[in-house]
Image (cartoon, helix red, strand yellow):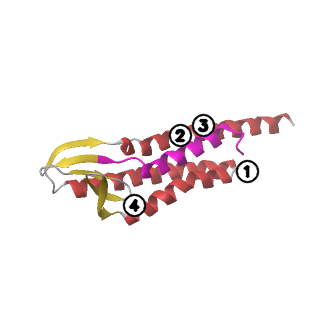
């Protein structure tokens, strides 16, 4: 199970999605000079040493955990490569839809604000990175499938 390269790619895909909890999505300074951050868990305002949560994104947080666990579920179905391929393609579509939802959520909270400065964080890149890892895992799964088919032909 862990000996195959696609296992590494699937673990990295899951880790990159879990890293969304660590890194901000967008950091900005509004017209009043208040520094704020959009994370997966909510909208935060920086006041000196602490962060005050202004808005909570509970549905987004729950969906992030579920989508981050899907590559581990794919990893667990290592005996059925066709099922792994199907789940991998479904996961890519889910991550794309999730990324769209994430951007729309961030836009909804930034639309009414006048911003002085806006920076995109590492959180913007992480869903795309996880898609890349899943594509690499698909290549590994296909390679294993070809090896098994060629071994069956030789018998």
Could you tell me residue 71's position as x and y percent? 57, 51
Residue 121 painted magenta: no
Residue assigned mark 1: 79
| Mark 4 or mark 1, whichever is nearer to me | 4
Could you tell me residue 59's position as x and y percent? 40, 65
State the CA–CA distance, disc 2 to disc 4. Answer: 22 Å
Mark positioned earlier in the residue sequence (2 or 4): 4
Q: Residue 139: which numbered mark, if any?
A: 3
State the CA–CA distance, disc 3 to disc 2. Answer: 10 Å
Mark positioned earlier in the residue sequence (3 or 4): 4
Contact between marks 3 and 1 (CB within 8 A): the answer is no
Residue assigned mark 2: 133
Q: Secondary structure at mark 4?
A: helix
From which residue to which does the magenta span run?
1-26
Contact between marks 3 and 2 (CB within 8 A): the answer is no
State the CA–CA distance, disc 3 to disc 1. Answer: 16 Å
Contact between marks 2 and 4 (CB within 8 A): the answer is no
């Amino acid at each position: 199970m862990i000996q195959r390269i696609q296992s590494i790619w699937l673990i990295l895909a899951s880790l990159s999605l879990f890293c969304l909890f660590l890194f901000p999505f967008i950091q900005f300074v509004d017209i009043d000079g208040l520094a704020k951050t959009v994370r997966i868990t909510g909208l935060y305002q920086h006041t000196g040493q602490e962060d005050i949560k202004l808005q909570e994104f509970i549905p987004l947080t729950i969906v992030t955990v579920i989508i981050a666990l899907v590559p581990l579920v794919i990893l667990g179905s290592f005996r059925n490569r066709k099922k792994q391929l199907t789940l991998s393609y479904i996961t890519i579509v889910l991550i794309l839809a999730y990324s769209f939802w994430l951007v729309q959520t961030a836009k909804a909270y930034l639309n009414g604000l006048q911003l002085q400065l806006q920076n995109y964080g590492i959180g913007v890149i992480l869903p795309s990175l996880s898609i890349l890892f899943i594509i690499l895992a698909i290549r590994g799964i296909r390679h294993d499938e070809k090896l098994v088919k060629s071994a069956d032909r030789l018998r």
